[in-house]
Amino acid sequence: MSLLQKLFGSGGKGGKQPTPQEAIQRLRETEEMLSKKQDFLEKKIEQELLTAKKNGTKNKRAALLALKRKKRYEKQLAQIDGTLSTIEFQRDALENANTNTEVLKNMGFAADAMKAAHGHMDINKVDDLMADITEQQEIAQEISDVISRPVGFGEDYDEDELMAELEELEQEELDKNLLEIEGTEDVPLPSVPSTSLPSRPAKKQEEEDDEMADLEAWAAN
């Protein structure tokens, strides 16, 4: 019987197959148990190493026995390391399988929902419905075009007569503008008043004359 069969049971006929969640939980428990075993063996190896060093050549037999036990514990520790690696690999595979199972289950649920949504739909009926919608849109567009078309209410005008009348109105407006321009040519320009600069006040001039006379008298002396 293999290690996995010991862990999960034989799974023979009539036996209930474990679910991925149960298997993952069992593997986690086994990993925890083996990790505790690792810690125990590491401590035993350290103790046997100290015993061998303590006895040394003074008690050679005791030292050799301690080293033999250390080797045995190291071998067990290496086996546990390999087992843990295998369990970790299998646990990862189970977790991935469980994830894929849930994904496929949800995708199947979505597919069933989509099938139910389309259950009352007939592709031929859908094509007929879309053709009816397109036809009604075209009819609506034709109605809009007819409604927006300008209506003359039975009155018909000669386009040449209308153009002649428009040219006549433009000529009258042009003649009017020319007459207004000719009338402005005979209007005289306004005269600009001429102003002379103000002269200095008489009193101010007398003061300047007196100052000049005083200056000349001082220069003469």
Image (spheres, rainbow, N blue to C red):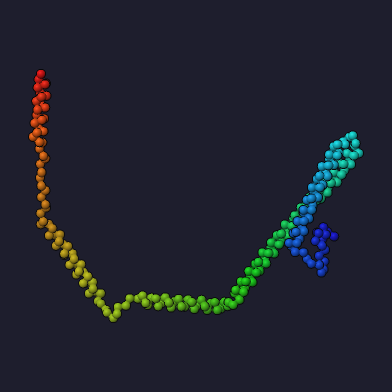
Q: Is residue 160 left or right of residue 186?
A: right
**Residue 142 rendering spot, x and y as whole percentages:** 41, 77
**Residue 215 rendering spot, x and y as whole percentages:** 11, 24
Q: Residue, x 30% and y 78% (percent of image)?
A: 152
Q: Quadrant of residue 16?
A: bottom right
User: Closest to the observer: 211 or 32?
Assistant: 211
Q: Residue, x 16% and y 64% (percent of image)?
A: 176
Q: Residue, x 70% and y 60% (percent of image)?
A: 96
**Residue 119 rendering spot, x and y as whole percentages:** 61, 76
Task: Decide: is 24 above or below 212.
Answer: below
Q: Quadrant of residue 120?
A: bottom right
Q: Residue, x 25% and y 74% (percent of image)?
A: 159
Task: Decide: is 33 above or below 147.
Answer: above
Position of the C terminus, as image quadrant, is top left
User: Closest to the observer: 28 or 174?
Assistant: 28
Task: Decide: is 66 above or below 165.
Answer: above
Q: Is residue 191 left or right of residue 119?
A: left
Which residue, as the protein is rendered here, is positioned at the far front?
203
Which residue, as the protein is rendered here, is positioned at the far bottom?
154
